Amino acid sequence: MSADEKTFPRDFTFGVATSAYQVEGGIENDWAEWERAGRLKEPHTRCGRAVDHWNRYEEDYGLAVDVGASAFRVSLEWARIEPERGRFDGAALEAYRERLLRMKARGLRPVVTLHHFTHPTWFHRETPWHTPASVDAFRAYVRACAPLLKGLEALLISLNEPMVVLLGGYLQGLLPPGFADGPKTMAALENMVRAHVAAREELQAVLGRVELGISQNMLCFTPDRWWHPLDHAAVRLGAHAYNHAFHEALVTGKLRVTMPGLASTRAEIPQARGSCEFIGVNYYSRAHLRFLPRYPFLAFQFRDRLGRGLTDIGWEDYPEGFGEILRETKRYGLPVWVTENGIDDRGGQRRPHFLHRHLEQVLAARAQGVDVRGYLYWSLLDNFEWLEGWGPRFGLYHVDFDTLERRPTPACAYFRAVAQGRRLIAPEALEAQPSAAR
């Protein structure tokens, strides 16, 4: 890369990401119920106090500022705000408002997610996603939240990784609510698109102009057997359904999903057309797909065919796929935000190189005409990692889960150097400087 190709523009945003349940602590919701039912990989694992961000938020804002971040992604916890259907907790709303104001005062642009995987305990019983009542429930929740966003100029995300929620919770039964039902999956998908539209209407009514999108987990898919035509077909269908169907619905108003033998849908949702201002990309890895002649018809695996070593959670380290995904988003003609990208690196030594290779892909995509506006690293802190519990460590800051002490990993110095210098540098160059251990 030339010197110009290694430079980020002054208005490019470097930030960090979190979600409420994973960091705040003290939340009673559907995930807390899932844990008590023993549904995690380690059945006795509990999120509990998480990493106590609810009480340590000022400290954590300071950590974000110290690594050069100018944006901080958080989520609002629906279960705090509406613990019982129709009863909104004014104290919780005021507390979130105060936290967001303090964030902005520290020079951090709020990136606010309205739904990040979790639901109030009543939701799946009274208004599950496969019923139309879910749209009304989400509308009422967003209507209650909209006033606390006034004056923040926040980047807004209605739904985080809706396809993960649907495939995990509705098709595979691995996440709440634990269904394994194709027709319900497709009904829930359509309702989540409609819920995004409803959220947009409520936000615009209070805020006027909004910058609203979704945050979509996007995998780079490749055929497990390069010579097998059905593996190639699985990649085409899987990439469209998983990576693009939801965003296409928000851009065109047409929802199209084809998963032969599992679930499919065709729906016209005119109100969804043009209902997002940006494309949110969460990227972590590449997956190899293999067609199977019987149910579930598809095998999904992470492989280390390039010999780089899988990450500690078992995913392939494949930055080239990040570039592919970013280039694919060009089809939408919208700005792109990397709303999550990170590595489970329990030793802490791989992360600077991971950041370098992935930020290199951001610059390459920008050079090819992709309007990438910002990069949010997942995550600021080590935290509770859903079904995996407390094993994975994605944080720029290492957290001692007993004492909750936050300590910088080597990636902090690297992230800071790039974010403040607006220039991509090799980790080796920073490691050679005595100050790099700051």
Image (cartoon, helix red, strand yellow):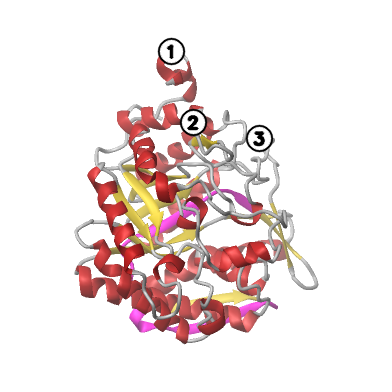
Picture coordinates of residue 283, whole percent (x, y): 51, 51
**Quarter of the image with the C terminus in it:** top left
Q: Give, as a single range, the part of the protein colored magenta.
A: 261-287
Residue 197 appears anywhere in the view = no
Q: Looking at the rendered structure, which numbered label has been put on residue 407?
A: 2
Q: Which residue type carries mark 1?
A: Pro
Up-down: is 280 above or below 202? above
Q: Quadrant of residue 75?
A: bottom left
- Disc 1 to disc 3, C-alpha distance: 28 Å
Q: Looking at the rendered structure, which numbered label has been put on residue 434?
A: 1
**Which badge, 2 or 3, is on the more N-terminal residue?**
3
For disc 1, the neighbor class at 10 Å (few under 14, some 14 to 19, many from 20) is few
Mark 1 residue element: helix
Picture coordinates of residue 218, whole percent (x, y): 52, 57
- Confirm whether the magenta stretch covers residue 316: no
**Which badge, 1 or 3, is on the more N-terminal residue?**
3
Residue at (48% x, 24% y) in the render: 427
Q: Is residue 270 left or right of residue 181?
A: left
Q: Which residue type carries mark 3?
A: Arg
Task: Confirm or deny contact between disc 2 and disc 3 (CB under 8 A).
Answer: no
Q: Which residue type carries mark 2?
A: Arg
Residue 374 appears anywhere in the view = yes
**Which badge, 1 or 2, is on the more N-terminal residue?**
2
Up-down: is 198 above or below 319? below
Which marked residue is nearer to the observer: mark 1 or mark 3? 1
Mark 3 — residue?
308
- Disc 1 to disc 2, C-alpha distance: 19 Å
